[in-house]
Image (cartoon, coloured by chain):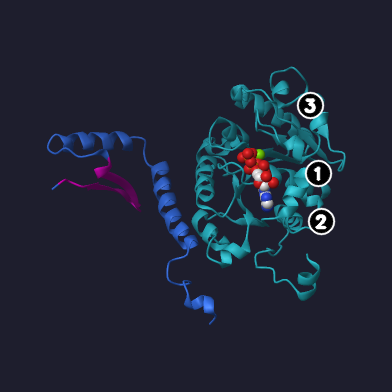
Amino acid sequence: MATIIVVTSGKGGVGKTTTSAAVSMGLAMAGHKTVVIDFDIGLRNLDIIMNCERRVVFDFVNVIQGDAVLNQALIKDKRCENLYILPASQTRDKDALTKEGVKNILDQLSADFEYIICDSPAGIEHGAQMALYFADSAIVVTNPEVSSVRDSDRILGILQSKSYRAENNQAPVKEHLLITRFDPVRVDRGEMLSIADIEDILAVPLLGVIPESQAVLNASNSGNPVILDEKSDAGQAYKDTVGRLLGEELPHRFLEVQKKGLLKRVFGG
Amino acid sequence: MSIFDIFGKDKEPKSASIAKERLKVIVAHERRARNAPEYLPALQRDILDVIRKYVQIDQDQLQIDLNDDGNCSILEVNVNLPK
Ligand SMILES: Nc1ncnc2c1ncn2[C@@H]1O[C@H](COP(=O)(O)OP(=O)(O)OP(=O)(O)O)[C@@H](O)[C@H]1O
Ligand SMILES: [Mg+2]
């Protein structure tokens, strides 16, 4: 049986796809057979971030509609043999996803994989609800900013009332808070919500804090999930995040303003 | 104390603390609405209709909230009447 993890947020553009790519790669590199599914029908992006956009032949909706079998649509990652990608379709029809169709695919994947990562579209409507419906666990991606925190709370409400687990009186979906695009300099100046503020309001255990980082843009430019950039702050923060998902106890890093040493100031860094 | 502490710094609340206060209010309100029984909006409309039999008020002059108090729920009704 696979563990199904949804990466969700409500608000758009907060880092769900970046996180889905990094976490799925991290789990796979740790030796777990992992598949990452792009639920963002019509706006697929995960294939670009994963650098497999030119290898997409069939997609998620083709499989649901019976035009292809699962194995024809799954793309094997070239960097890590434990990782597979199931791309979203470019169809405009957002209702192409049905509970039955999604369940059927997740059941098939469950037989072969240890982790299934679902990259949710933005919003709290149908697409986002399909992505989270069958989840065992949720990574709620939140930026330190009012509208993002509010939307995270809405998504938590949906996880608690409209997921399969909630509707069938099973153990609740396990919730994890992932704060991304965190900038300690701005927190120090009192311009940005702090980690404690966000934890206080959402009351969800903190899985990780990913700093605002140039490395994320570099990663998306080159199509390498940022976790592969092992020297970068964001890469290391994602690596810790995956470690915690797997049960390791690791301190949170990159929370403080980095004091640049003299050498760094002179030579840049 | 640096020169920055004299000018400006602690005079106004920082925008982050304003953000936190606003968020607390919004989130508490939305959570109550989420957990409220389904009849609450209808009840609110009916109460509004009863009041309007006597005084004309705008919809936003009536606020109702259902608060959990352990054994029972307390319905809080706030009405602003024009002078
Ligand atoms: N830690 C970070 N530091 C800097 N930029 C980031 C970080 N995380 C994400 N970004 C940038 O933010 C943008 C949105 O990221 P991403 O596509 O992962 O968000 P999303 O939540 O999947 O968006 P959508 O809701 O549209 O699916 C991208 O340009 C990405 O490079
Ligand atoms: Mg996305």
Residue pointed to by mark 3: A73
- Give the colour chain A carries in the figure: cyan
Q: Quadrant of the N terminus of chain A?
A: top right
Amino acid type of the residue tagged 3 in the rendering: Ala
- Dot 3 lies on which element? helix
| Comes first in the chain, label 2 or label 1 | 1
Task: First in sequence, mark 2 or 3: give its number.
Answer: 3
Chain depicted in blue:
B
Q: Quadrant of ligand 1?
A: top right
- Label 3 vs label 1: CA separation? 23 Å
Question: Which residue lies at the image location 63% right of the left edge and 60% below the top edge?
Answer: A183
Q: Which mark is residue A222?
A: 1
Res. A6 visible in picture: no
For the C terminus of chain A, which image quadrant? bottom right
| Span colored in magenta | B60-82
Please state which amino acid type lies under the numbered disc 1. Answer: Ser
Q: Is residue B13 left or right of residue A41?
A: left
